[in-house]
Amino acid sequence: MTKMLAPPPPGLAPVPGDSGLPYVGYALKYMRDPIAAYTHRYHEHGPVSWFRFAGRPWVVLLGPDAVGAALQNRDRALLNGPGWRALIGPFFDRGLMLLDGDEHTAHRRIMSQAFTRDRLSLYTDRMHPSIERTLDGWTPRDDFRVYPALKELTLGLATEIFMGGAEGSSDREMDEVNRAFIGCVQAATAIVRYPLPGTRWRRGIVGRARLEKFFRHYLPARRAGDGDDIFSVFCHVESEEGERFSDDDVVNHMIFLMMAAHDTSTITLSTAMQYLGQFPEWQQRCREESDALGTTTPSFDRLDELTSLDLVIKECQRLVTPVPGVVRRAAKDTEILGHFVPKGILLNLGMHFSHHMPELWPDPERFDPERFSPERREDKVHKYAWAPFGGGAHRCLGMHFSGAEIKTVLHHLLLRFRWHVPADYVAPMNFTSLPFPNDGGPIHLLPR
């Protein structure tokens, strides 16, 4: 039964919706099939509605108009930090995504110095040896599970580029670190939000403690050294006003960035491996461009020549958006598309849904990288039709690093291997947190 969220003031409409099941609300429907759940909600209630999740009412914004209004946040009513803190605060607190206002601006200003074009060029050069070492251990075979293999690869890259390596760490310790990241990410959407034994919430709490111990162990050496990895840069960089990060700042930012860097890249890489395996003409087209570079270790600037990979990556980020939605909290009463949003309410901005709207994308479930070609540019139909990196003041700071990492890894894979995925394969995606294939993404991997 449709109910209004709160009585609106004159001139505004109430937010319609319903609570769903007791306590869990619509969480289970979303986790089973988010596009189906949001499509039903969009047609029933429109672009602004409310539901219940884990005992709390949430406003969900669907479609580029509603999402764009929240991302632009013209009246500064929507806060980033308190919204995300409701989901991931205990695990990624004080990461850049959880800061607001002047503090967010100051931290972003300092951090941006770690992502200049010169530094991105340096990071790209340092990726190649790490990628090659990891791929040396890949054994071509049928039923190769590409998602866990890519996750190991991207964690290794993050450890190398972000930390300058983890000297003295064993494979067992790095496996523990990987599990700690997984625990923190999956705890975000836990329905039981108390650290009871065996719960995702407890695994997140334990994981956060493990990650803090890991980074604090290496902190003194990075403070004392003069390395050019991101960890070292955070330890030494200053803004023009002389602002610097405290030890706690460095640890908090490193935990968040390491998660963001390897988890989101892994999702796009595994999606690209699936679709390039199902569409051999695109795999070959991309491979020919990689061959044409004439090098296994292209510079950051030369990655721009891999134009077909650009199209593929954008289409994969549309089909499986690494961060399907972002979160805000209303700091004061506000309105979105004429609907009254009361102070204190949590909001979910469903970018992933926009990426599958037939009103924006013809035949949206079809893999069609040419959507992003200069001749078509379907993503330009609306400013927020395609927004995998968010928008506004909190647009992802690492988007260019992510693009370089994904393209560099795929370049190496195309030069080393061929692979095949049955045309009728549909990945059984798990949406309990960031999306990933439950079956590990099986492919038939062959030497080139």
Image (cartoon, helix red, strand yellow):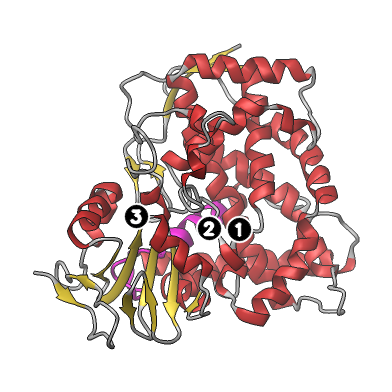
Label 1 residue SS = loop
2 or 3: mark nearer the eye? 2
The residue that mark 3 highlights is 432
Label 2 residue SS = loop
1 or 3: mark nearer the eye? 1
Q: Which residue is drawn at 59% across and 16% down?
A: 285
Left/right of residue 154 with respect to residue 277 in the rendered view? right
Compute the Cα span from label 2 to label 3. 20 Å
Compute the Cα span from label 2 to label 1. 7 Å
User: In the rendered structure, which amino acid carries the disc numbered 3?
Assistant: Thr
Q: In which quarter of the image is the C terminus?
A: top right
Label 3 residue SS = loop
Q: Which mark is residue 122?
A: none
Work out whether 60 lies above or below 288: below
Q: Give the range drawn in magenta.
A: 175-198
Quadrant of res 375: top right
Quadrant of res 10: bottom left
- Tell which residue pokes out farthest to the top in this image: 448
The residue lying toward the viewer, choosing from 4 and 167, is 4
Compute the Cα span from label 1 to label 3. 22 Å
Position in image of residue 329 (x %, y %): 43, 77
